[in-house]
Amino acid sequence: MFKSTILYSVIAVILTVLVCFIISTLLPGIERKYVHARIQQRIGPPVTSPGIMAPIKFLFKENVEVSSPVPGLYKALPIVCFIVVLCVLIALTPYSFAIPALSSLVAIVGFLKVEEICYVLMGALSKSVMSVKMPFPDVVKGAAHLNTTRSFIEDISARRSLRMITYGSFPLYLALFAPVTAARSIFLQDIVQYQHVHGPFLFTISGGIAAIVFFIGYMIVLNEYPFSIIKAKCDVIEGPYMEYAAKYRSIIFITRGFLMFTLGALFSVLFIGIPPNILSPSILINIVVTLIFVLMMGIFSAFTPVFTNRQLLPSILGATLLGILAIVLGLL
Amino acid sequence: MDEKVPRSNIIETEIPLGTVHPAALEPYRVRLFVEDEIVQEAEITIGVNHRGIERIMEGLPVEKANSLTEKICGICSNSHVWNSCRTAEIGLDIEIPERARYIRVIMGELERLHSHFLYLAHGCETVAHETFSMRVFYLREIVMELLAMIGGNRVQYGCSVLGGVRPRCDLDEAKLERLKTDMDKIEEGLNGFAQRFLADSILISRVTGVGVIPQKQAIKLAVTGPTLRATGVARDLRTTMFEYDDFDYNIITQADGDVKSNLLMRVLESFESIKIIRQAIANLPEGSLVNRDWEMFDTDIIESYIEVPRGTLYHSYALESGRVRHCIIRTPSMANIGAMQYACIGDHITDAQLSIVQCDPCFTCTDRAIEIIRR
C-alpha cells in the first residue's frame, strides 16, 4: 500500500512537472508574439520560436569554448538554475506536502536565492570578447589615461546581480511571506488548507496589496524590463549570459520559460490556494494565472524603459513598503 | 548650469565598450573611467571604418568626385552630394534653376526627417523602450518611401548634379500629391508620438537631466547642429543658405542640453521640416532642372558650409583642369565628439551610450574623412 502510494505520487509529480514544462516552453513565445509584437504593431516570431524552436536549434549548435577562469563551474550554472526551478515546482505540487522540509516557504526562498546567486557567479566568471578582450588598441597614442585597472563588462553585471540579491528581490520575498501572516504557518500545506477554509488570500486587502508586490518581484526575478539592469542592452549587453552558447544557451532559454510558469504556480499556491496537480482540473487555474502574469509582464515591459539606480531604488523601496504594509495588515 | 569637471586624477576602473556593441549602431570604442558605476571620464576612439574618401577624390573629375561623396554616409548621403556640387557651383559661379533649388530643399528636408526619426528611434531603443522605437521607425518608413519615390533609392538617391538636379528626380503632379498626403500622415503620427512621449512619466524621468551639456561648454567644444541648439544657442546655417531664402520656418532651441531636450529638439525640428516641404510643394516653380550653360576653369580652394540633419557639413576643394584637388570634408560628428565624451561625465554607466547617442553620432561619415594632426 505504502509502496503504491509512493509510486502513484512519483508518477503524478513527474506528469505534473512534464505538463508544466511543456506549457512553460510556450510562455516566452506568447509574451513576444501576442504582447510585445501586437503592441509594437509587428508580426513577431512564431509562438513556438523563442521557447521551443530556439532551444532545440541551440542544442544542435557547435559549442564555443567559453572564456572563463573556472569553465567547469561556469558551464554548470545554467543546469543548476534549471534544477533549482525544477525543485521549486516539485515543492509546489501537493504530493510534496508530505515532506515539510521541501514544501515550506523557507525552502522555496532558499531555492530562489540559489537561482539569484547563480547570476552573480555567471557574471563574475564570464570574460567575453565584448570589452577588454576586443582586439582594438584601447591605449592609443595620445590616450588620456594609461595603466588604469580594466574591467570586463560582465563584472558590472555580477555587481548588479549582487545588489539585486541584497535589496532588489526583497519585495518578492515580502510578498511570499504575506500569506504566512494569515495562515500562521510557513508550510505550503497549511497555507493551502487555510485558503480552502477561508477563501483565497488574494481577495483580502492584505492579499491584494501583496499580489501587486509579488508581480513587481516577479518581474525583478525574471530580469524583465524595466528591472533588467543585470542584462541591460545599453551597457552590459547580455550580462551574465554573454558567453553561453549552444546547449548552455538552450538551457537558459528553457529555464526562463520554466521560471515564468513556476512563479505563476507559486502565486496560485500562496494567493489562491491551488497547487499544480495534473490529476486535478484545477491545474487549469494554475495555467490561467501563469498566462495572466505573462501577459501583464509583457504589457508592462513593452511600455517601460530600462531603469537606472535613479528609478530602481524608489521603485523597490515603494514595493518594499507595500510588502511591509501587506504583512502588517495580514497580522492584524 | 554648473560645468561638469572630469575627475581625471581619481580613476577607479576602465570599462571599454565597443567597437562592437548592440547599443551603438556604428563601430567605435569608448573607454569609460568609472567610480561606483558613475562615469568620471570618457574617451572615444574612432577610425575602424576608415576609407579615405578625400584621398580617393583627389584627381578625379569633379562630376565623379561629387558622386563619390554620396558614399560617405548612408544617412545624409544627399547632403554630401548636395554640398559637394554646391562647392563647385560656388567656385564656377553656376546658377541653379529655381525648380532644382526647391527640389534640393525638399530632398534635404526629407533627409532631415529621416535622420531625426532615426535619432528618435535609436534614442528610445537605447533606453530600451522598444515600443516607441518601433513606432518612430514606422513613421520613418513613410519618409524612406518618399525618398525612394523621388530619388529611385532608399539610401543613395543621386539627386544633385552639377548645375541642378537629375531629371529623373523631377516632381510631377502625382508625386507632389503623394508628398502632400504623406506630410499630413507624418505630422499626425509625430504629434501622437510627441504627446505619448511627454505623457510617459517613466520615460521622461529616464531622460531628464541625463547627459547634460551646458551652453557654455557646448560653445567651447564647438558643438554644431541640433545638439548645439538643444543647449539654447539659436545657430542654424540654413539661415545663411540662399536655398532657404524663400522659406518661412523657425529655429528651434531647447534650454537644458540634456537627452530630453535633444529628443524634443528633433521632434520640433521635424515639424519645421514638414512646414518647409509644404511650402516647397505649394510654390514649386516651373522651369528646367539643370543648368548646363557653364564653363570649367581652374579655381582656388572653394569652401561650402551647409546645415545637414546632424550639424554643419563642410566641403572644400580646388579645381584644376576639371579635377578635384586639396579635398577636405568635415562632418558634424567630427565636431561633436568632444561633446559626446563630455556628456557621459557624471552619469550612470547605463546612460553612457544614451549620452553619446544624444549628440547624434555618425562615425561612419567621420571615419571616411582624413584628419591630419600636425604636432
Image (tube, coloured by chain):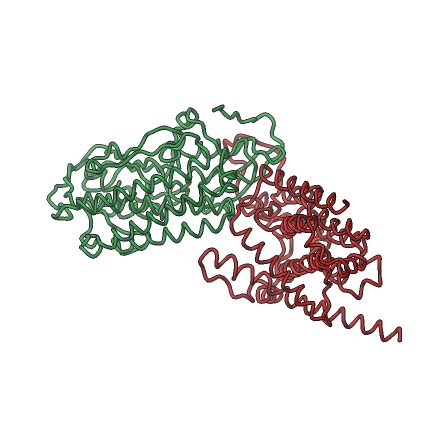
Chain colours: A red, B green
Residue occupying the point 20% across, 35% down: B245
Q: Position of residue B85 (x, y in %)?
A: 23, 42
Looking at the image, which is closer to me, B182 or B61? B182
Residue B148 in the image: above or below residue A148? below
Whether residue A315 is visible, yes or no, is yes
Number of numbered callouts drawn: 0
Q: Note whether residue A61 is visible.
A: no
**Residue A89 x/y as whole percent:** 73, 61
Residue B260, by quadrant, is: top left
Q: Is residue B7 left or right of residue A185?
A: left
Give the side of residue A32 with respect to residue B94, left or right: right
Residue B146 position within the rendered picture, expressed as x and y whole percent measured from the top left: 29, 53
Q: Does residue B338 sit above or below B366 in this rendering? A: above
On screen, residue A159 versus residue B154, left or right, reads right
If the image is split into quadrants, where does the C terminus of chain B sit?
Answer: top left
Q: With respect to residue B47, does B216 lie above or below?
A: above
- In the foreground, A48 or B27: A48
Q: Relative to A33, is B160 above or below?
A: above
For the residue pair A285 and B101, the one nearer the viewer reads as A285
Residue A57, picture quadrant: bottom right
Quarter-of-image position of residue A322? top right
Q: Nearer the viewer, residue B228 or A305?
A: A305
User: How far from the left and from the top, in percent, is residue B151?
Assistant: 26, 53
Q: Residue at x 84, y 71 (%)?
A: A6
